[in-house]
Amino acid sequence: MKANSLQKVMFITNIPTPYRVPWWNQLSDFVDLQVIFMDKTEKNRKWENVLQAGKFKYSIIGGVHVDFPKRDWTLHFNPGILYSLTKYKPQKLILGGYDSITTLLALCFAKLLRIECILWYESTQDSANLRQSFLKRIKTFLINRFDKYAVPGESAKANLIALGVKPQVIYIAPNVVNNTYFSEKSLEFRATKEALKADLGLPDKVILFVGQLIERKGLHVLLEAYKELEDDSVGLLIVGDGHLKAQYEAICSQHGLKFVKFVGFQDVNTLPRYFAISDLFVLPSHREVWGLVVNEAMASELPVLCSKYAGCAYDLIQEGENGYTFDPHDATELAQKMALLLNDSFVLRQMGQASKKIIDRYTIDTSVRGILEALN
């Protein structure tokens, strides 16, 4: 990759996230980067001190923020974005989405200033959920106003092409995590795996769920599938928090699911221990633009059962090699696939090793290279 210190790039996104900080750090080695955040955080996020490790230039601009909890979405309106664009005068603008007033303002103003605009686009045909044709027409119109596009994988690319975008202006910059960190930390915790399981009261084999306890994450289907297993040698470990926690705990109590353990939200420092004591990772989301927790699970050498509606499914899951995809509305299918894997320890280990080999190709370097290709 060639550095171009003269190229001024502005990246506008909603909030700082721990996954993106190392990515922005590396990108800032190659361009003069200014990241603009619309807010410090959003109500459904519990991350703390996210920007502590940031080495890039950034600012958090004031604005009005309206939460839509049922849609798991926050609408941002930051009029100050016009001043930021005028002050910084970027040569290239990357917008982390198109669905806020702020990003639409930035897009219109950048067009007036003749700044090249790149859309960071993660939606897939399964996650977009556009039932009404007039909404699809609006989306198609807005998306085709950009000059170039960066996507995390093939599913998002296919969605853009279906919306009329030419393939030659789409660049793949995979969604990534720090693979080395999760690999090394999970290996470290595996040395005390049995003691950690005993502390939590977990049986021999453990299924892991990591995510918010909200409707679209599909935990209710996983609980139903786990109930269908009827196997007391298998536990279910639930990492995460959300407004449905009490409801899910009540379901477990009602059905006598004594080996379902809720451990609450865990940050990047404590999360690897839960990967380390688990045998199988399940992502049952009904809607998921990617699913970075799958990257983390694979870096921790876990086989994965992944919702076919997750954006990462096409790129990261090789059927029968490191796991399987499934319909997150079908608890019986999920139960059958969990039983298939959990009944064979050798297959679990093989698939976990395959996960590690696959995810090793998805690095920060690879992702930044994709963005630089779009910028150049």
Image (tube, rainbow, N blue to C red):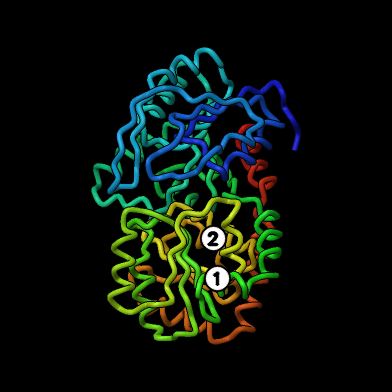
- Side of 149 where 376 appears, left or right: right
The relative height of residue 90 versus residue 230 in the rendered view (above or below) is above
Where does label 2 land, which residue? Answer: 294
Given residues 245 and 114, the one toward you in this image is 245
Mark 1 vs 2, N-terminal side: 1
Q: Is label 2 in a helix, a strand or a loop?
A: helix
Q: Quadrant of the image for the C terminus?
A: top right
Residue sitting farthest toward the right: 2
Q: Considering the numbered disc 1 on the image, is that residue within a helix, a strand or a loop?
A: helix
The three-letter amino acid code for the residue at tag 2 is Val
Residue 194, position in %: x, y? 62, 75
User: How packed is label 1: few (under 14 Cα within 10 Å), some, or many (20 or more)?
Assistant: few
Which quadrant would the N terminus be assigned to in this image?
Answer: top right
Cα separation between marks 1 and 2? 25 Å
Q: Is residue 287 visible?
A: yes
Q: Residue at x 62, y 22 (%)?
A: 8
- Amino acid marked by disc 1: Asp
Q: Looking at the image, do the residues carrying marks 1 and 2 touch, with CB atoms under 8 Å apart?
A: no
Q: Which residue is mark 1?
A: 199
Above or below, 153 relative to 114: below
Q: Residue furthest front?
A: 199
Q: For residue 300, which numbered disc appears in the image? A: none
- Residue at image x 65%, y 51%? 178
In percent of the image, x 66 and y 65: which residue is there? 189
Q: Position of residue 356 (x, y in %)?
A: 67, 65
Q: Nearer the viewer, mark 1 or mark 2?
A: 1
**Residue 19 found in image quarter:** top right
Quarter where residue 73 is shown:
top left
Residue 306 visible in rendering: no
Location of residue 32 (image quadrant): top right
